[in-house]
Image: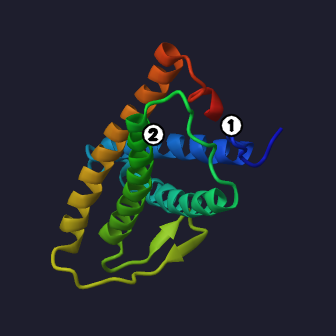
């Protein structure tokens, strides 16, 4: 079992970060959509947002760790048989996914951090650090919502591109992350 990435494959740490974050982000998106329809008297009205916020904080922490791991163990080199535009598109998509996670997590924090600390599974709280933005909750809610949709659409494109490489191009793009 190889822990670090090499020139042709991802290591187990990079794979774990990738799939754990993918599952968390897809789960957060689904939970976020489901929470919208909860009524005040629904038993999940308080619990679901708490879970959503807590997992969101863990996502940003894992993204920071993933970024640091990427500095320690750089990703495999690009596959030589792929076109230059595919390399550029993949690098752009990855950069956008990283940026979107950051934007979504910060805006999510700012939705809730207007007056209260944000609890993380009742383990610890993140204090309110930025206050006084006019209509902060509404503005950050819009950014969070649109960012989440862009993230899911871009993630779907990312997955479809990997499947295309596997089925049609028959290269190792998908195998390197499995």
Residue beneath disc 2: 87
Q: Closer to the camera, 148 or 135?
A: 148
| Quadrant in the picture for the C terminus | top right
Give the vertical position of 58 relative to 2 (above or below): below
Q: In this view, does 53 lie to the left or right of 14?
A: left
Q: Closer to the camera, 7 or 97?
A: 7
Give the vertical position of 148 relative to 153 (above or below): below
Q: Closer to the camera, 158 or 134?
A: 158
As measured in the structure, the alpha-carbon distance from the residue carrying label 1 to the one carrying label 2 is 15 Å
Q: In which quarter of the image is residue 99?
A: bottom left
Give the vertical position of 163 relative to 154 (above or below): above
Residue drawn at x 57%, y 67% as measured from the top left: 122
Give the vertical position of 124 relative to 5 (above or below): below
The tally of labels here is 2
| Residue 40 visible here | no
Residue beneath disc 1: 8
Q: In this view, does 4 lie to the left or right of 36?
A: right
Q: What element carries label 1?
A: loop
Residue 18 x %, y %:
58, 44
Residue drawn at x 66%, y 47% as measured from the top left: 14
| Quadrant in the picture for the N terminus | top right
| Label 2 packing within 10 angstroms: few (<14), some (14-19), many (20+) | some
Q: Is mark 2 on a helix, strand or loop?
A: helix
| Residue 72 visible here | yes
Residue 95 x %, y %:
42, 53
């Amino acid at each position: 079992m190889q822990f670090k990435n090499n020139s042709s494959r991802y290591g187990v740490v990079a794979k774990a970060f990738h799939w754990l974050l993918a599952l968390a982000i897809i789960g957060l998106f689904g939970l976020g959509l489901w929470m919208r329809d909860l009524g005040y008297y629904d038993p999940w009205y308080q619990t679901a947002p708490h879970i959503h916020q807590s997992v969101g904080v863990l996502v940003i922490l894992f993204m920071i760790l993933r970024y640091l791991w990427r500095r320690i163990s750089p990703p495999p080199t690009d596959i030589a048989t792929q076109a230059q535009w595919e390399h550029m598109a993949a690098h752009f998509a990855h950069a956008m996914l990283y940026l979107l996670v950051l934007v979504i997590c910060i805006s999510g924090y700012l939705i809730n951090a207007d007056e209260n600390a944000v609890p993380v599974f009742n383990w610890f709280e993140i204090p309110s650090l930025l206050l006084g933005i006019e209509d902060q909750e509404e503005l950050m809610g819009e950014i969070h919502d649109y960012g989440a949709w862009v993230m899911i659409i871009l993630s779907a494109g990312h997955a479809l591109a990997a499947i295309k490489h596997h089925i049609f191009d028959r290269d190792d793009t998908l195998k390197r992350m499995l």
